[in-house]
Amino acid sequence: MKKTKLTDLEKQLAQQQKIKDWFDVICPNRDRLITNEDNVSAQILDAEDDVLECSFNYDMAVTIDTKDLSYICLDMDNLQTLQDLLCDAEEYFDKYYDSIDFDDYNDKIQ
C-alpha cells in the first residue's frame, strides 16, 4: 500500500479540530446563551483563552465578571460574539416577559 501525504489543508483542518477540542474541554458551553427563567448568562473565551462569565439583565448591556482576572483581552471575534449573545438575550427576555401574566403574578405576591 502506498502512504498518502496529508495536504496542507488537511493538516490545517486537523490542527483547527485539536484547538476546538481543547476549547471544548476548558469551556464546553462557550458562546451559548444559558437561560433559567430570568437568569441569563454565557461564557466566552477571550483572546487569551481565559473563560469570561457574562450575564445579561434585559438592559441592552452585558456584565463581565472580572473578579478573578487582572485584565481581559477582547478581539473583534469576541466583541462580535458578545454582540450576538446580547441580541439573543434581549430576544429571550422579550419572549420570557411577554409570556408572564403580571396580573396573576401580582395577585400571588400580595
Image (spheres, grey):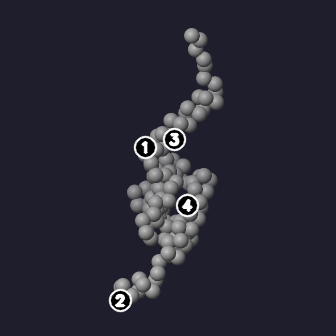
Quarter of the image holding residue 65?
Answer: bottom left
Name the residue rendered at 55%, 72% in the picture.
94
Q: Is residue 46 positioned above or below 106 on the image?
A: above
- Report if the CB atoms under discs 1 and 3 are less than 8 Å apart: no
Mark 4 vs mark 1, CA separation in Å:
21 Å
Name the residue rendered at 61%, 57% in the picture.
80
Q: Amino acid at mark 2?
A: Gln
Element at badge 1? helix
Instruction: Name the residue tied to disc 4.
Output: 85
Q: Quadrant of the N terminus?
A: top right
**Mark 1 packing: few (<14 Cα in 10 Å), some, or many (20+)?**
few
Instruction: Name the residue tied to disc 3.
Output: 20
Label whose residue precedes the other's in the sequence (1 or 2): 1
Instruction: Name the residue tied to disc 2.
Output: 110
Label whose residue precedes the other's in the sequence (4 or 1): 1
Q: Is residue 86 visible?
A: no
- Report if the CB atoms under discs 2 and 3 are less than 8 Å apart: no
Name the residue rendered at 55%, 33% in the picture.
15
